[in-house]
Image: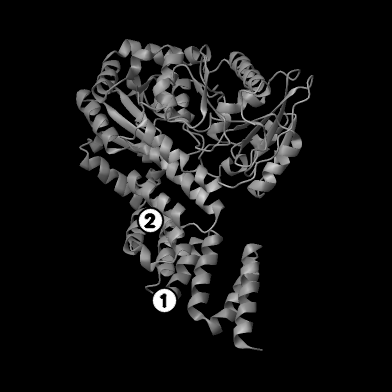
Amino acid sequence: MNPMKQLDDLRAYLYGCLERRDFAAAMTAVGELARLCPAEAAGLRVSIAVEQGDAAAARAALPGLLALAPEEPYTVFLTARVLFMELRYVSARKVLDTLREPERIAPVYREKIENLRGQCCRILGRSREAAESYLAAACSSSTRELAAMEYSNYLFNLHYLTGLTAAQRRQAAAGYQKLFEGVEAFRQHRHQAGNRLRIGYISPDFRHHVVLCFCYALLTGYDRTRFEVYAYMTGPEDQDSQLLRRHVDSWRSLQGMTAADAAAVIYEDGVDILIDLSGHTRNNALPVLAFRPAPVQVSGIGYFASTGLAAVDYFIGDACLDDETVSAEFTEKLLILPHSHFCYHPFEETPLPRESAFLRNGYVTFGSFNHFAKVSDAVLEVWRQILTAVPDSHLLLKASIFDGGEAEDYARRRMERAGLPMPRVECRGISRDYLAEYADMDIALDTFPYPGGGTSCDALYMGRPLITLTGDSHGSRFGKGLLHSVGLDELCADCPEAYVERAAGLARDKELLHLLHIRLRAMMQASPLMDEQQYRAEMAGLYETIWHRYLTGGGSE
């Protein structure tokens, strides 16, 4: 047989095995490939181990590749990828930084390199670099699907940055639409009078995920005489998914489908209003909405900024967070609810702490359980000022970056450089069931400009007051909306100086602090944040309003 034909056939077989995820057969083929192309085979050995999530096997295979092709961009990428699997994010970023000359890197590798660099920078809190890398990855992507994923990463990471105007945020979001120019939308049906309004919700997070805490009320207990609810799950399911599917009229698993095929399923279901709950978060469903499978499409709740997608007509907001200034950042029309734009439903009814931490310890403990990527240098400076203003106070941080290794060392060095008194700072790693750990905190400190979401709700639910700094965007005002809903506007600051003052003042008022620890959960339960009946009624009215607008020619066709 012609050697080139033999090599082509072997590659076709090998990559077919990888596409089917038949790794055993692929590794056998790699053994044959090693006789013909040893460097390519060595790279595949590392790559297959990476795909299987086997860091030890990937590390063991790496020297063979380094010996054969040490300076190839893909070799450098795989080296960094192995380091990333070993949670050595600092080392991985340094390796990738040796490949900053785009002209010498093929686009197929450049996308992978920039994506990995973006992940490392995001984890380490280097947010501007992360956004730049994700944008470069989007520009280097070979397919619309890849470009959309990378551009979503870019938009998401912009929320960590300060100084962006509403116009700049809108312009950045609108760039997403350019990826879908030319997509042919479905021709829309007309709802038959007398039938229930058919509402569809689409998300990869109908599972044990914070988004479920925010949308549970929408998918359960709705008025079945007025609405028929379809849930479209685009990700893997778990036990919470199985419980949720019992509440809706129809449950569809779209996992693994192309965006076009998933859109066809929704279109054939005859959904009237489709609500996207993922926005530009991980594994989002926006490419499905680009085909406009429903005549009216809405986004919100699970994401906090414009999608930029022309096929999305509306975004869900509320009267506390949104005004004309905020609306300027959206390509969608804002739907302003009179109260909260979401309703919080905790996963479990964890008992309140029996005792305030300051009574047990003799000092006040501030805390944050947010992802540490949200902790900017400006946040660290404000926290330093708070610990200085309350000399005997402590700071409790809980995040995945504190699971050990060089990333934790990097985070600790950042805090030291910021001047935090590290003997008074406790760092804990991530854990699934963490609500009980709010017992070790007295006052929750919000991050900015990217505030907490589920963690802030959890803090209030566990009786821990929140200090937040109001921003100028829908997303950066999340904490303000929470505090307004429970009647604690005085804990909301409009500048860093006020943030420090609010935190230090509450720490000194031990009587008020103890009272909040006892009563805050009841205040939250009595507020719009947890009033499921009121929330469902307001959302039902909203759906009927925008559907009437569509039928009378005021909405999108």
Report helix, strand or loop for mark 1.
loop
Decide if residue 487 is in sight here: yes
Height in image: 436 above or below 44? above
Give the quarter of the figure containing the N terminus. bottom right
Residue at 46% in and 30% down: 330
Residue at 62% in and 72% down: 14
Marks 1,2: beta carbons within 8 A: no
Give the image quarter of residue 542: top right
Mark in the foreground, 1 or 2: 1
> For the residue marked with disc 2, what is the amino acid?
Arg
x and y percentages locating residue 458 in the rendered image: 47, 26
Which sits in the foreground, 5 or 420?
A: 5
x and y percentages locating residue 61 in the rendered image: 48, 71
Q: Is residue 485 left or right of residue 211?
A: left
Give the residue pinned by disc 2. 88
First in sequence, mark 1 or 2: give its number: 1
x and y percentages locating residue 479 in the rendered image: 41, 23
Give the quarter of the figure containing the C terminus. top right
Give the residue pinned by disc 1. 69
Which sits in the foreground, 519 or 311?
A: 311
